[in-house]
């Protein structure tokens, strides 16, 4: 297939704990994506991470070599842009940032390490383009290191949770035998069930979900072990688990045509499906391909002013929020911006901006180190809300505000780190022998000087926010009145 050079083309890469996957697609002119090519490689980047807290050097090298090949393939297919995200393995590893630096230097690909909320939002956005989400639905995206659960009603996302459950993670903890023993799989399901029990029922009605949609490799490979026309329910999932107890990883890989390394972790993934099903009691289970790369492509090909809109209303109009057959991709893409969801998130984001703004004066005043901490906590909560709501608002103005929310967290990080370190050093000094006091005092002095410099940078950043266009922009976009009370936090009287 040749690429239509008149259409924008991009490649989306998902760097997961088990696999690295790429989809190459182009804008179809109707708000959707036409897939041109794809690639997948089982790298097991997260292997051993629970034990060491680090990404393994050999796994990182294998990942970079895979990404080099993917980048070449994408460019040969005419991709003008490559967008990439890294999920649980990278975001949780102590050397995750170093790995991403290596990827950028070796391949030229700039990778975003995204949190679970952003991962869920991208997955849901992509799924809207391919799946009927009428009724009450829970989406389960089971990865190697984490599982994202998303609840939706009639195509509007209600809530999302990222859980520390993954097929690779549970395999390393509980599965030794090949084929796995029944007690090992039972341990996987029990652990998954205990984690899922800690999560509220995702805003679902008392009757539970109409459907559970399992996306990604775990669902696809599980389905290959069932009859094509088989109704999928809890018993069908347990039948698959029973079959997996009889197949070695090599035999399973041959039977369903997947790499042996991926076959090795599949039983734990299916055990997670069983635990979710037991908890949610859906009327039926469906399988769908993962939406995260479609979500990335939609973001890359449509969000940079493609709609030409500067206001949410301009991109929405009157939209039927009931997905059904025959509905155009453009309308499906717009349904995430349904008025109810958008207005709910607009109010939530406005309130969280107000909380951030209210906390800034204490951080600037500086007499209590918790002032900086309070702003950082409030900004992280704000970012979580903005991550979820991103598909509902035009990127032209939403992205800069989203970026500012992230910058607030980062700008206060250097100060907070030194506040915590100074507190620990002073506590250590109080119990240390007198002979160690001079050394500790020198270290305290050094950290205090670093803190003064960091506070200077932080204060300049916050003052720029206070006197700039941001308050008016927040009022306009989110109805957030964020002027500090009684002038506290204004620039007046603070220049000295």
Image: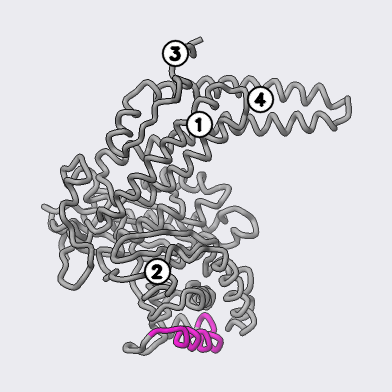
Q: In which quarter of the image is residue 158?
A: bottom left
Q: Position of residue 316 (x, y in %)?
A: 19, 51
- Nearer-N-terminus badge (2/3): 2
Q: In which quarter of the image is residue 418?
A: top right
What whole-number distance in Å separates the C-alpha atoms at marks 3 and 4? 29 Å
Describe the colour scheme in one phrase.
Answer: one colour
Mark toward the viewer: 1 or 4: 1
Mark toward the viewer: 2 or 4: 2
- Nearer-N-terminus badge (3/4): 4
- The 10 Å Cα crowd at callout 1, few under 14, some 14 to 19, many 20 or more, is many
Q: Which residue lies furthest to the top in this view?
A: 496
Q: Which residue lies furthest to the left in this view?
A: 6
| Residue at which label 1 appears | 359
- The 10 Å Cα crowd at callout 4, few under 14, some 14 to 19, many 20 or more, is some
What whole-number distance in Å separates the C-alpha atoms at marks 2 and 4? 48 Å
- Nearer-N-terminus badge (2/1): 2
The answer to whether residue 66 shows anywhere in this view is: no
| Residue at which label 3 appears | 492
The reply to whether the C-beta atoms of the residues labelled 1 and 4 are less than 8 Å apart is no
Please state which of residues 340 and 293 is positioned toward the viewer in this rendering. 340
Q: Which mark is residue 138?
A: 2
Check if residue 234 falls in the magenta segment.
Answer: yes
Query: What segment carries the magenta color?
Result: 232-250
Please state which of residues 16 and 254 is positioned toward the viewer in this rendering. 16
What whole-number distance in Å separates the C-alpha atoms at marks 1 and 4? 25 Å
What whole-number distance in Å separates the C-alpha atoms at marks 2 and 1? 36 Å
């Amino acid at each position: 297939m040749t690429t239509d050079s008149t259409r924008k083309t991009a490649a989306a890469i998902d760097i997961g704990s088990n696999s690295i996957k790429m989809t190459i697609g182009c804008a179809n002119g109707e708000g959707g994506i036409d897939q041109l090519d794809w690639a997948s490689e089982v790298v097991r980047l997260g292997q051993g991470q629970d034990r060491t807290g680090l990404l393994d050097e050999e796994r990182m090298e294998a990942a970079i070599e895979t990404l080099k090949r993917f980048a070449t393939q994408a460019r040969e297919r005419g991709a003008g842009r490559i967008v990439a995200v890294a999920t649980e393995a990278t975001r949780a590893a102590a050397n995750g940032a170093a790995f991403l630096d290596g990827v950028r230097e070796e391949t030229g690909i700039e990778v975003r390490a995204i949190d679970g909320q952003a991962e869920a939002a991208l997955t849901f956005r992509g799924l809207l383009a391919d799946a009927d989400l009428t009724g009450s639905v829970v989406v389960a995206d089971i990865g190697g290191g984490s599982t994202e659960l998303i609840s939706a009603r009639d195509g509007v996302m209600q809530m999302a949770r990222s859980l520390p459950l993954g097929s690779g993670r549970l395999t390393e903890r509980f599965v030794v035998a090949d084929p796995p023993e029944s007690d090992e799989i039972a341990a996987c399901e029990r652990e998954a069930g205990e984690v899922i029990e800690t999560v509220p029922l995702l805003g679902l009605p008392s009757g539970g979900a109409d459907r559970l949609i399992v996306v990604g490799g775990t669902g696809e490979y599980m389905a290959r072990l069932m009859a094509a026309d088989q109704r999928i329910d809890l018993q069908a999932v347990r039948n698959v688990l029973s079959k997996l107890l009889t197949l070695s990883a090599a035999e399973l890989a041959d039977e369903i045509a997947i790499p042996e390394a991926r076959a090795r972790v599949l039983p734990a993934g299916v055990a997670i499906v069983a635990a979710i099903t037991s908890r949610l009691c859906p009327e039926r289970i469906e399988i769908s391909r993962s939406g995260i790369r479609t979500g990335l492509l939609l973001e890359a090909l449509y969000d940079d002013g493609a709609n030409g809109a500067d206001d949410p209303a301009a991109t929405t109009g009157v939209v039927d929020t009931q997905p059904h057959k025959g509905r155009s991709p453009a309308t499906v893409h717009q349904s995430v911006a349904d008025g109810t969801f958008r207005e709910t998130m607009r109010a939530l984001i406005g309130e969280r901006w107000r909380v951030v703004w209210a906390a800034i004066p204490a951080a600037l005043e500086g007499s209590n180190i918790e002032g900086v901490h309070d702003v950082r906590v409030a900004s992280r909560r704000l970012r979580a809300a903005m991550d979820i709501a991103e598909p509902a608002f035009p990127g032209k103005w939403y992205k800069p505000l989203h970026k500012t929310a992230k910058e607030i967290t980062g700008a206060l990080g250097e100060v907070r780190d030194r506040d915590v370190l100074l507190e620990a050093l002073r506590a250590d000094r109080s119990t240390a022998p007198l002979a160690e006091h001079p050394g500790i005092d020198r270290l305290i002095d050094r950290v205090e000087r670093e803190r003064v410099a960091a506070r200077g940078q932080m204060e300049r950043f916050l003052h720029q926010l206070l006197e700039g266009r941001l308050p008016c922009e927040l009022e306009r976009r989110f109805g957030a009145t964020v002027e500090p009370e009684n002038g506290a936090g204004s620039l007046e009287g603070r220049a000295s």
